[in-house]
Every structure is written in C-alpha cells, then in structure tokens.
Amino acid sequence: MAEETQIVRKLSYFGTNDPRPFPDYSPKKPSIKDSELVHHISITLKQRRCENLLRALKPFESKFRPDHLIWVMMNIRNDYKLVLDFFQWYSLRRDPSLEACCIVIQIAAAARDLVMVHGLIRDFWTKPNLDLNIAFSAFLEKLIYTYKTWGACPRVFDIFFQVLLEVGILENARKVLDKMLNYGLVLSVDSCNCYLSRLLVSAHGPPMTMNAYKELSELGVCWNTATYNIIIHCLCLISKVEVAHALLMKMELKGCVPDVISYSTVIDGYAKVQELDVILKMAEEMRVKGQKPNNFTFNSIVDLLCKSGKVVDAEKLLREMIRQGVTPDKVIYATLIDGFCRSRNVSAAFRLFGEMQEHELFVDSVVYASLICGLCHIGELAEADKLFNEMLGRGLEADVITYTALIDGYCKGGKIRTAFSLHNQMVLRGLVPNVVTYTALADGLCKQVQGLRLMRDMELAGIWPDIYTYTTLIDAHCKSGEMSRAHELLREMLHKGIRPTVVTFNVLMTGFCRSGMLEDGEKLLEWMLEKGVMPNTSTYNSLMKRYCIQKNMGSATEIYRSFIRKKRYAEARELFGKMREEGLHGDPAIYGTFLDMKYKEGDVNATLQLCDESIENCLVSKSSSGVT
C-alpha cells in the first residue's frame, strides 16, 4: 500500500481539489436465458476440479457469445487462475473484445501479477497493422472505464505507460501521463524515469528531456537517484559538465545519495573536456564517501590520460584498478594498447595484448587495427602484415583505417605494387577508400609521376582530394623541378575553394628557391601575406638560403629587420640560427642587427661571442662597413 500511496496523489495543481472520478462500470444486462447459461458455465468452471477445461466447456461452445465472456468473468473474478484459464480458452476460439482484454488486465493487476499485465498489454501493442491513434484512444478509454470496478490498481497505468515507451510511442505515452493527472494520479517515479530516458535518445533528446524534467518537477514528482543520473547524463551530453557537477553536489540536499553512476557520468563528462585535475579530485571524493569506481569510471580516466600522452600513468591506473578488485574489460585494454601504439611504444602495447589473451578477453578488430597502425608507424611492415593476416584468419573484418595504415607503410617503403594490391583488396571487400588512403597512394605514386592519374581516379570515385592530397602532389612536382605543374595545381585547388596552408606555401617556396626562381618566391611571399596566411621561419629560411648563396645580403638583412620591426624576435633568432647551422654567413649588416639586439638585451657573453664570429666571418669581406 505504501508504494501505491506514492503513486496515487491528489493534486491542487489543476486549480481544483477534487480530481475527476473514475467512471463506474455498467455492462450490458444479460437476458434471463443468458443469465441461466452464464450461471451454468460459472458453476461448471468452479466445480470442474481436475477436469480438462476443453472437455468441461464443450457442451456450451455452440451457445457461447462474446458478451458471455464478460458476464462469466464477473462471476469468477475472485479466482485469478480460473479467469486466466477461461480467457485463454476463449482466445483460442476468437479474438476477445478490447473491453474483455482490459478486464483481464485489471484482474491481473489486482492480483499483483505485473508480469502478466505487461505481457497482455504488450501483446496488444505489438499486433501487426495496428492503427496506433485509433487503438490508443480506444485502449485508454477502456482501461479507464474498467479500472474502478475490476481492479483499482494504479500500477496498471504505469505498465501501460512503460509499454508505450518500449514500443516507441512517446507522444501517446505523454498523453497517458497527462490524462492520469486529470484523475488525480501521478505515475510512479520509475515510469517518469523511463520517459526521461526514452526522450534522451530521441531526435531532439536533451532539450526535450530537460523540459519534461522541469514540467514533471512542477507537478510534484518525487525524484530519486536514478532520475538525477539521467539528468546529469543529459547535461554532460550538451557540454554543461559544470552544471551536472553542481547537480551532483545538490543531490544529498534533495534527499538522494549520489551513487557510482552519478560520479562516473560527471567524470566522463570532464574527461571529454580534458579536465584531469577535477577528475582526480572527484575520484578522491568517491573514495572518501565509500563509492567504489567501476569499469566505466576507470575507462574514462584511462582514456583521458592516453589522449593527454600520459600512457604510463594510464597503465598505473590499470594496475590500481586490478588491486581494488575491479576486473578490467576489453575496452580499457583497447584504449591502453591504442595509447601505447600512438606513442610508438609498440612493445608495451604487445605486452598488454598478451595480457588480454591470458585473461581470455575477446580481441576485436579495434585492437588489431591499433597494433597494425603502431607497427606501420615504426616501419615494421613484415610484422604488421603478419598480424593483419592473423586478424583475417580469426574471421575479423579489417576497416578502412587498418588498410590505410598498411597502404601508407608500403608506399613509404617503396612497395607501391603491394600497396595497390591492398587497395584493390579493400575495394573488393566493400570498403570505400577515403582521402587519407588516396593521399598515401599519391605520395607513393608521385615518385613514379602517376599521382595526377590517381587524383583523377579519386574524383571519378566521388572522393574529392583535400589540402593534404594537393600538398603531397605539389611537393612531388617541386622535388622533380616541375614548378609550372606545381603552380598549376595551386591554381586548381584555389579554384575548387580549397585554402592552402602555410605548409603548402612552404613546399612551393622551397621548390622556387631550389630551382633558382627567386623572383617567383618573392611574389609567392607577397601573395601569402595578401591571403592572410602568416609565413613562418621555414618560409623565410628557403629565401634566406638563396639570398646568401647569391650574395644578396641586402635582401637577407631586410628579412631580419622586418622580423625585428614586428617584434618577432624569437623567429628572427631561429632563422639566424638555422642559417649559421648550415654554414651560411651573413654580412656585417646582418651581424650588426643581431649584435645590437643582444647588447640591448644585456646578454654580454652572447654579444662578445657573436662579435668574435662576425670578425672571423666578415674580415674576408670586401665590404668596408664592418662591425666596430
């Protein structure tokens, strides 16, 4: 009764203290002849003892009509098992009316057979070719009509509501909730939680969930920990992690104790925004409050540590997890293996791979993909190919990422035929190569002057080359001295709306300078600045080399001075350092610029060292403007 008291509550919210009463049940009255038949059937059912129901009711089959079903159930309603047997007997012969179905549902609810209630309601709502709107109105009407007389157990509306949610009829489920409020019933908090959970995974999930939560709160629903966990998850989904954290802190004030799910959800939210310090504080708070972290908690923290490059710390957490008696699942091992592979510590990744096998955890294609990519990155193509074949031999499917890693590895190793063989294999398996796959192939083919053909094949396949593909092809043409073709590719990418990066410009600048086309390099620099692409030291380094080789020290000096005028001192120093490392010496004006800068910074030792270097390198110069 305590549970039902929580479900059934009077509400003054609707402007009246008197909720709408449930209707009285008033069935059609039987005739004298019908009454006699119903009486005989009822007596037969009650007295049949162990006699087979089919045999006992055989004499009445020809006279039995749909109305008789309800009239007989009125006489035997106190014997729940008998009602079910009789209803089943009738259902094998013809479809019972909706009213009769609702009566049996009410009787089952009154008998606390909630599994049967759920099954009967679900059977109705999973019928094929059901007109949902017509069926909903009729079903709800009959359920309300039969409620007062046949059961008066409010759980029946809870279960009806939950079945509608299960079959995905959220709009009608909400109508049930609103309709019950008119009768003074608030559905159970479990039902409301089901509703919020279903809303959360619907098309406009988070905003609809938050609106429903606010509305139901105003109606007086007493929320529990499960509710707050749903709302915390919702807030994390819309990147309001701090609000979710604040709600967790307020839960105890609302009479609900946060559980491991509450903490784990917020920790996962903070992990997605890489707030490691906050996460560690929350983990300590969990420990103080006696909340034992679960797999999900540890997975979130391990994932963040791996993404932050702290893979060793992540493995330490794995060991602590095992020490606390929490068995790691395949997800946490997969995360760590991927982390070690990305940091090029493939041996550590294989050690964890061995642990997975020892613990009989299923090694899926994700783990194999990480290991294969890791081996390719360190040039262990033979081992990568061996693992790839092992993966296929176990019946696992390789994805585009795995194939692309192998293709890239073989292209870099000069094994273009093997790379294309893998490309053909992935296409035959129904996988669609992506732009990264084609860029890897382009990089390999450019060495054989076949990159352009591949790019056209990409376009025919509906895969448009991106900035990386174009930059790769431009670089190949620059290295082979085909600057006009490289320039043509730049114009083509601009025409397609692809914005060059500073890397693209640097590739071209290096090509122009290497080919002695200094004037074109200078024009490219001007054009970069016009387009708002900021040159870096690599851009200027190519020009500086050419200026120094051609003894055009005036232009070289002007580059340094422009850096200093713009207060880009670090870049000026980096450029000067690179020039000296490569054995290129500036003229007295360049040395003078940097001597003046060092002197103003108060770095006496560096000034004296640079002064000695300038005297040594510039004494042989014919210039009369030496440093004094």
Image (cartoon, rainbow, N blue to C red):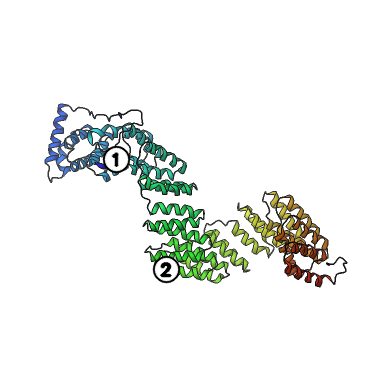
Question: Closer to us: mark 1 or mark 2?
Answer: 1
Give the image location of residue 186, x and y in percent: 33, 37
Between 366 and 561, the one nearer to me in the picture: 561
Q: Which residue is mark 2?
A: 357
**Label 2 neighbour load within 10 Å: few <14, some 14-19, many 20+:** few
Is residue 319 in sight in this rendering?
A: yes
The relative height of residue 127 versus residue 604 in the rendered view (above or below) is: above
Amino acid at circle 2? Gln
Assign the N terminus to one quadrant of the image.
top left
* Residue hosting label 1: 6
- Estimate how packed mark 1 is, as few (under 14), some (14 to 19) or many (20 or more) residues with alpha carbons within 10 Å: some
Residue 517: percent from left, percent from top = 80, 60
Q: Nearer the viewer, residue 449 or 623?
A: 623
Under circle 2, the secondary element is helix
Residue 405 in picture, x, y percent from top left: 56, 63
Q: CA distance from mark 1 to mark 2?
A: 51 Å
Q: Position of residue 364 (x, y in %)?
A: 45, 62
**Mark on residue 307?**
none
Against 321, residue 35 (above or below) is above
Q: Residue 628 falls in which quadrant of the image?
A: bottom right
Identity of the residue drawn at 62% across and 55% down = 458
Q: Is residue 458 above or below residue 27?
A: below
State which quadrant residue 566 falls in. Answer: bottom right
Looking at the rendered structure, the kind of residue marked 1 is Gln
Depth order, front residue of 573/584: 573
Q: Is residue 445 left or right of residue 335?
A: right
Number of numbered markers: 2
Q: Is residue 442 above or below residue 250?
A: below
Name the residue nearer the viewer: 258 or 581.
258
The residue lying at 46 percent from left, 54 percent from top is 268
